[in-house]
């Protein structure tokens, strides 16, 4: 139970009010001029407010278009390397066909974005390029990598899975049912690409379904790795084998809030 | 809670999966298959069982109770008429893909559409593998010219 009387409470509130006025008078409100006499180390940047970033159907479609260009660039790099020879010579034709498919997909999703009033996006996704593809290519093309040819196919396989997952994932996000259908119409073909490349990397009917490496316990590449289309991250093991037999593993994830192609993102190509 | 419209569309998708499940069961029973071939078809059969069961759970009391006999007969006819079981199953998977995609065009619930999408991407993988068992033609594995089956 409080021991303050009504009179004491009024007196205390008066004191608090007076203290506030004194403190306020010491601040800028009292006309104090900044003379920059106090030294500050370094310079603080002026912060620019972030642009409004709304995840709309058009943004999701522009993001899907950007991934198509990531895939096209990956196949171009694969062909430019000139390592698809011998047993992997057949991959050259596959790469050309898949790249042409991605070009058609890019046209299709850009057309849908334009119908929604958005601008088309004809560049690869910068974050996907910088975070996954460029580092992967650097590892693959290293002089000490004895598996350049098969690793470039593994990268293409990972990108196809990424594309298939992206289209599958946006079905839950798109607001228009017709656009959901359009998205998965493309996504199902990316899944076919991934399955065919998986059979090149790990051939044979026994390896179509999920299997694991008996030594490492890690899942092997599979054409049909799960019963339902997975949205989990994609493992890409590439590069020179380490003494214990393991290789560098990159984990690829579908575009998220920090890699969507928002309305204000301009193509720099 | 599913809308009445979604229930109708999904119930038909469920019927299609029941029908495809039974078609694969018939294919797996073929004596001409090698061990690896049978194991592959058993895996694909198991996937369709999982799709049927997931749709059953979603639809609950509105779930389909049996396959569509007319479609089953037409699917089985493809298997028996075709000299190549792989191409017949490819055609069936392609039909499932376009039919589920057609369903997504009208389904109101995004989550339900996402479930069908997660089936479609795997059925597409089935299709690519089935095609590769009988041809090296890329278009056969990648293009889908099947006609969608829709609820009447």
Image: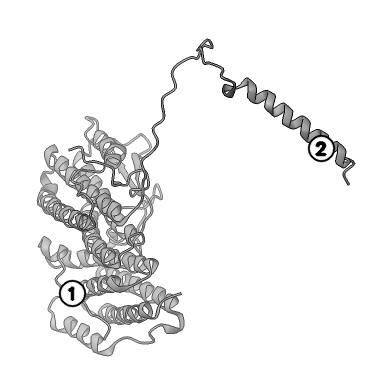
Q: Nearer the viewer, mark 1 or mark 2?
A: 2
Question: At numbered mark 1, what does the secondary structure look like: helix, strand or loop?
Answer: helix
Residue B136 visible in the picture? no
Q: Residue A70 location, x and y as percent?
A: 22, 45
Question: At numbered mark 2, what does the secondary structure look like: helix, strand or loop?
Answer: helix
Q: Residue A79 location, x and y as percent?
A: 12, 42
Horizontal side of A89 relative to B113 (left or right) equals left
From what the image shows, is residue B90 above or below residue B16? Answer: above
Chain containing mark 1 = B
Residue B28 visible in the picture? yes
Q: Nearer the viewer, residue B33 or B50?
A: B50
Q: Nearer the viewer, residue A159 or A172?
A: A172
From what the image shows, is residue A177 above or below residue A96? Answer: below
Chain containing mark 2 = A
The image's mark for residue B91 is 1
Q: Residue A118 location, x and y as percent?
A: 23, 52
Q: Are marks 1 and 2 in contact (CB under 8 Å)?
A: no
Quarter of the image for residue B130 reads bottom left
From what the image shows, is residue A248 above or below residue B74? Answer: above
Quarter of the image for residue A168 reads bottom left
> Mark 1: few, some, or many residues within 10 Å (few <14, many ≥20)?
many
Quarter of the image for residue B81 reads bottom left
Horizontal side of A73 relative to B68 (left or right) equals left
> Mark 2: few, some, or many residues within 10 Å (few <14, many ≥20)?
few
Gap in Å between the C-alphas at discs 1 and 2? Answer: 87 Å
Q: Residue at x 11, y 45 (%)?
A: A86
Quadrant of image for the C terminus of chain B: bottom left
Q: Residue B8 location, x and y as percent?
A: 35, 82
Q: Name the outermost residue toward the top.
A: A37
The image's mark for residue A10 is 2
């Amino acid at each position: 139970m409080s021991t303050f009387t009504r009179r004491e409470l009024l007196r205390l509130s008066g004191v608090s009010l007076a203290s506030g006025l004194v403190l306020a008078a010491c601040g800028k409100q009292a006309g104090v001029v900044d003379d920059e006499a106090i030294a500050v180390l370094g310079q603080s940047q002026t912060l620019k407010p972030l642009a409004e970033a709304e995840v709309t159907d058009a943004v999701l479609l522009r993001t899907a278009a950007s991934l198509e260009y990531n895939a096209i660039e990956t196949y171009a790099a694969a062909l430019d390397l000139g390592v698809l020879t011998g047993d992997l010579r057949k991959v050259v034709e596959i790469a050309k066909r898949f790249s042409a498919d991605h070009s058609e997909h890019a046209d299709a999703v850009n057309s849908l974005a334009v119908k929604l009033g958005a601008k088309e996006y004809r560049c690869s996704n910068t974050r996907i390029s910088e975070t996954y593809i460029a580092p992967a290519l650097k590892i693959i093309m290293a002089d000490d990598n004895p598996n350049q040819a098969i690793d470039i196919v593994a990268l293409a396989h990972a990108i196809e899975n990424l594309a298939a997952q992206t289209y599958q994932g946006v079905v839950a996000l798109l607001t228009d049912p017709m656009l959901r259908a359009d998205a998965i119409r493309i996504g199902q073909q990316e899944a076919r690409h991934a399955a065919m490349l998986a059979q090149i990397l790990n051939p044979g009917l026994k390896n179509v379904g999920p299997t694991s490496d008996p030594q490492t316990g890690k899942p092997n590449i599979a054409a049909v790795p799960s019963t339902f289309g997975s949205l989990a991250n994609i493992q890409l093991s590439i590069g020179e084998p380490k003494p214990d037999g393991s290789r560098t593993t990159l984990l690829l994830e579908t575009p998220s809030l920090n890699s969507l192609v928002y309305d204000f993102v301009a193509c720099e190509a | 809670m599913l809308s009445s419209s979604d229930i109708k569309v999904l119930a038909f998708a469920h019927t299609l999966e029941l029908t495809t499940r039974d078609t694969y069961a018939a294919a797996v029973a073929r004596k001409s298959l090698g061990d690896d071939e049978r194991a592959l078809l058993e895996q694909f059969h198991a996937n369709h069982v999982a799709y049927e069961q997931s749709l059953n759970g979603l639809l609950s009391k509105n779930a389909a109770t049996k396959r569509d006999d007319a479609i089953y007969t037409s699917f089985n006819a493809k298997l028996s008429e075709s000299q190549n079981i792989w191409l017949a199953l490819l055609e069936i998977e392609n039909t499932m893909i376009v039919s589920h995609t057609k369903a997504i065009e009208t389904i109101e619930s995004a989550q339900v559409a996402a479930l069908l999408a997660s089936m479609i991407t795997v059925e597409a993988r089935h299709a690519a593998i089935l095609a590769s068992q009988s041809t090296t033609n890329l278009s056969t594995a990648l293009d889908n010219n099947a006609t969608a089956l829709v609820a009447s």
